[in-house]
Image: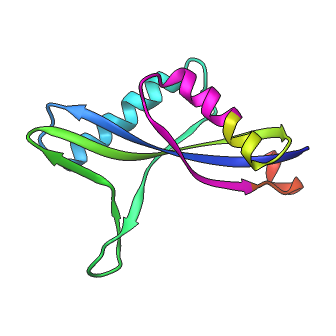
């Protein structure tokens, strides 16, 4: 059995916002509030992607008609999983239980070496 860091991606919608920064702040805050009673060990970050023109990293957030869509990364450590697929299943179960009605996709799965577990 191995330990893994599983990162899932989620598209978070935010209503009645005026700017991308507002949408990002509200999305991270709402996700954190929904995760923290039962899954406070989940890290919430804004997803970045390279700009198609300059290659610089930019946030994956968009606001149209005062409705925002923010790409979030939800990361957690999964201990004693049989394989990477099992670790993803556990992470989706834990995070999905807290974030009902939010679609989750696998972003990355990394094997945790012995020294990294104590973080």
Left or right of 119 on screen, residue 10: left
Q: Which residues are magenta?
A: 90-110
Give whichever of 84, 117 is nearer the camera. Answer: 84
> From what the image shows, is residue 100 above or below residue 77?
above
> From what the image shows, is residue 92 above or below residue 57?
above
Give whichever of 71, 26 is nearer the camera. Answer: 71
Q: Residue at x 39, y 37 (%)?
A: 28
Q: Residue at x 61, y 26 (%)?
A: 39
Give how far across and how far down residue 105 sits, in percent: 52, 44
20 part of magenta stretch: no
Left or right of 33 on screen, residue 13: left
The colour scheme is rainbow
Question: Which residue extends farthest left?
Answer: 65
Q: Residue at x 53, y 22 (%)?
A: 98
Left or right of 57 on screen, residue 106: right
Left or right of 105 on screen, residue 11: left
How many labels sit on residues? 0
105 part of magenta stretch: yes
Question: Which residue extends farthest front?
Answer: 85
Question: Which residue extends farthest bottom?
Answer: 54
Q: Answer with the quarter of the image where residue 116 lies.
A: bottom right
Question: Which residue extends farthest right?
Answer: 1
Give how far across and how far down residue 112 sits, in percent: 79, 54
Give how far across and how far down residue 103 sits, in percent: 44, 35
Image quadrant in which the N terminus is located: top right
Q: Residue at x 31, y 73 (%)?
A: 51
Give how far across and how far down residue 41 sits, in percent: 64, 33
């Amino acid at each position: 059995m191995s330990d893994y860091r599983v990162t899932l991606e989620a598209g978070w919608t935010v209503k009645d916002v005026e700017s991308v920064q507002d949408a990002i702040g509200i999305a991270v805050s709402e996700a954190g509030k929904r995760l923290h009673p039962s899954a406070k060990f989940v890290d919430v970050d804004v997803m970045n992607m390279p700009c198609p023109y300059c290659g610089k990293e930019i946030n994956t957030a968009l606001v149209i008609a005062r409705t925002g869509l923010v790409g979030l990364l939800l990361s957690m450590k999964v201990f004693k999983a049989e394989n990477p697929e099992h670790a993803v299943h556990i992470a989706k179960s834990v995070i999905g239980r807290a974030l009902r009605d939010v679609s989750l996709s696998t972003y990355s799965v990394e094997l945790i070496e012995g020294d990294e577990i104590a973080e």
